[in-house]
Image (cartoon, rainbow, N blue to C red):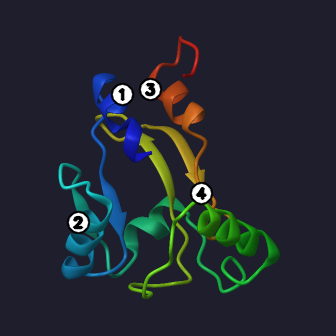
Amino acid sequence: MRPRIPELRALGADVVVVGNGWAAVARAFQERLEINDVPVVCDAKRDAYRLAGFRRSVWSVFNPVAGWFYVRAWFRGHRQGRMQGDAWQQGGTLVIQPGGAILYRFAARFAGDHAPLNAVFRALRPNREAV
């Protein structure tokens, strides 16, 4: 999603990353991914994850699909660093309107499972084609 943040902002979206670690981990994440212009907030208690209904389980990490996602990411040059935060907690993507209405929700089923960007863009442009 990082390369398309300018497009998301052009559609009026604010992008925020929520992690389940602590402040030092958030800063290191921002620096490593070079996203210093995107707020990264910490939810060590995972309250936002629970409210969003995001999955937390050992099986979401140790299963064949997650293994495939790991291998695919590795061959694309992404390397897993030291685990920080809750390794079993899966994330997701929410598109939320001002006022709190959820326009789009994607809950990762496995480690490495990401929201299809076309769906995120469709949620931001409900009457237009996805890019």
Q: Residue at x 32, y 61 (%)?
A: 33
- Answer yes or no: do the residues labelled 1 and 2 have beta carbons within 8 Å? no
- Which is more toward the observer, 26 or 109? 26
* Whole-number angstrom distance, CA of label 1 to CA of label 2: 21 Å
Single out the mark in the foreground, 3 or 1: 1
Horizontal side, residue 130 vs residue 51: left or right: right
* Whole-number angstrom distance, CA of label 3 to CA of label 4: 18 Å
Question: Residue 124's mark?
Answer: 3
Residue on which the image places disc 1:
7
Q: Residue at x 66, y 86 (%)?
A: 58
Residue on which the image places disc 4:
107
Quarter of the image holding residue 109?
bottom right
Residue on which the image places disc 2:
31
- Disc 3 on helix, strand or loop? helix
Question: Residue 16's mark?
Answer: none
Tell which circle, 3 or 2, labels the residue nearer the N-terminal end: 2
- Answer yes or no: do the residues labelled 4 and 2 have beta carbons within 8 Å? no
Tell which circle, 3 or 4, labels the residue nearer the N-terminal end: 4
Give the residue type at disc 1.
Answer: Glu
Residue 130 drawn at (x, y percent): 57, 21
Give the residue type at disc 3.
Answer: Leu
Q: Residue at x 48, y 70 (%)?
A: 50
Residue 17 drawn at (x, y percent): 33, 57
Q: Is residue 110 visible?
A: no
Give the residue type at disc 4.
Answer: Ala
* Whole-number angstrom distance, CA of label 3 to CA of label 1: 11 Å
- Disc 2 on helix, strand or loop? helix
